């Protein structure tokens, strides 16, 4: 989440008038994240999240995301479906951007997950993968393996502004991972593709919400798990791996969704790919985020440091 587009109180009040959600009391921009503009909105009827979709999220993908949230909510998962306005429309326009109002879910995002919390997150991902059975829509992974080399080339030698030698290091890792990418193995399904701790809401050790589905797509379920493993199992600097957290996540997932032998064999490469993917996307944002954007940039090196845990041959 972030704030790229400023929304005035007058514009927001007029926007809310199209919904049965009461009158505006307050609105506060949310700086965390890098993808869309988000506000925490309080009205006389309750609390909501307002999202304005920025350029990285294609307007044509929004029906997929909205349909997926409705599908998961109907199956009892703790996700925030969009609120439709009085015309029955989920996606409106605000400040020239596609926008939607979603339900606020209780809970907090943990910054230092415990094994018990990681176990619950793994169980929640397993429940998600089982709940999407029968979901009829598909969406290509816009940040999948096919996108990494083009993004690497767009970043170019500017990567060395972040750390000397980063360009060549990522290039070597990209060659090695793509040469062994296990795309022909495992099960493809609808995946979250971004289930970081800040996209899981918790109360104690219980998951109360799964949010931010704007990278959801059709891809390998084991890659989805690998993304989450890389996100949950390290400290914020990426220097310290916590095997107890990582093992608990895998245990929670495996209780209802056991990985196949092919998925287990390819897991290290899938996780290394996740390290490359998030290093590159963070690097692009680090180099290109507008200076006046209310957004918390994320350190690309904090992800780059993780790759050697999964592929020791690529250790930096």
Image (spheres, grey):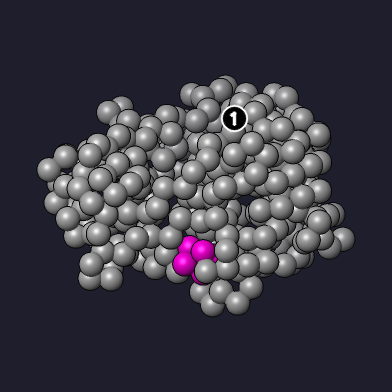
**Circle 1 Cα neighbour tier, 10 Å, few/some/many (<14 / 14–19 / ≥20):** few
Q: Nearer the viewer, residue 283 or 149?
A: 283
- Compared with 72, 147 (above or below) is above
Q: Give the residue at mark 1.
A: 111
The quarter in which the N terminus is drawn is top left
Query: Judging from the image, what secondary structure is the residue with disc 1 in?
Result: loop
Quadrant assignment, res 34: top left
Residue at position x 59%, y 41% in the image = 202
Q: Would residue 163 be found to the left or right of residue 256 on screen? A: left
Residue at position x 31%, y 64% in the image = 84
Quadrant assignment, res 77: bottom right
Q: Is residue 70 magenta?
A: yes
Residue at position x 16%, y 39% in the image = 8
Q: Would residue 239 be found to the left or right of residue 57 on screen? A: right
**Dominant SS type (magenta):** helix
Q: Is residue 304 visible?
A: no
Residue lying at the far front of the rendered structure = 44
Q: Position of residue 157 (x, y in %)?
A: 50, 32
Q: Would residue 206 be found to the left or right of residue 108 on screen? A: right
Q: Nearer the viewer, residue 248 or 180?
A: 248
Q: Nearer the viewer, residue 151 or 71?
A: 71
Residue at position x 69%, y 24% in the image = 239
Q: Is residue 188 magenta?
A: no
Number of numbered discs? 1
Q: Position of residue 197 (x, y in %)?
A: 59, 39
* Residues rendered magenta in the picture: 69-73
- Compared with 154, 147 (above or below) is below
Q: Position of residue 72 (x, y in %)?
A: 54, 65
């Amino acid at each position: 989440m972030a704030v790229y587009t400023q929304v005035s109180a007058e514009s927001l009040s007029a926007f809310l008038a199209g919904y049965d959600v009461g009158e505006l009391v307050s609105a506060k921009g949310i700086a965390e994240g890098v993808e869309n503009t988000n506000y925490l909105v309080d009205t006389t009827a309750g609390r909501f999240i307002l999202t304005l979709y920025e350029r990285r999220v294609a307007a044509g993908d929004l029906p997929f995301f909205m349909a997926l949230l409705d599908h998961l909510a109907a199956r009892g998962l703790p996700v925030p479906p969009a609120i439709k306005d009085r015309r029955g429309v989920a996606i409106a326009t605000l400040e020239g951007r596609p926008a939607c109002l979603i339900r606020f879910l209780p809970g907090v995002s943990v910054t230092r997950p415990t094994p018990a919390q990681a176990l619950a997150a793994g169980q929640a991902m397993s429940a998600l993968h089982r709940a999407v059975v029968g979901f009829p829509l598909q969406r290509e992974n816009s940040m999948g393996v096919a996108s990494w080399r083009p993004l690497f080339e767009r970043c170019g030698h500017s990567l060395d502004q972040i750390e000397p030698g980063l360009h060549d290091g990522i290039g070597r890792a990209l060659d090695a991972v793509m040469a062994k990418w296990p795309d022909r193995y495992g099960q493809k399904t609808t995946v979250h593709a971004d289930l970081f701790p800040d996209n899981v809401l918790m109360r104690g050790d219980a998951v109360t919400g799964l949010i931010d589905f704007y990278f959801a797509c059709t891809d390998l379920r084991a890659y989805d798990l690998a993304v989450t493993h890389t996100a949950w199992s390290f400290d914020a600097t990426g220097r310290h791996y916590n095997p107890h957290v990582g093992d608990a996540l895998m245990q929670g997932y495996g209780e209802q969704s056991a990985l196949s032998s092919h998925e287990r064999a390819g897991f290290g490469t899938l996780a290394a790919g996740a390290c490359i993917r998030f290093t590159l996307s963070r690097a692009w944002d680090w180099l290109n985020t507008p200076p006046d954007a209310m957004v918390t940039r994320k350190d690309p090196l904090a992800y780059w440091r993780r790759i050697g845990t999964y592929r020791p041959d690529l250790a930096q």
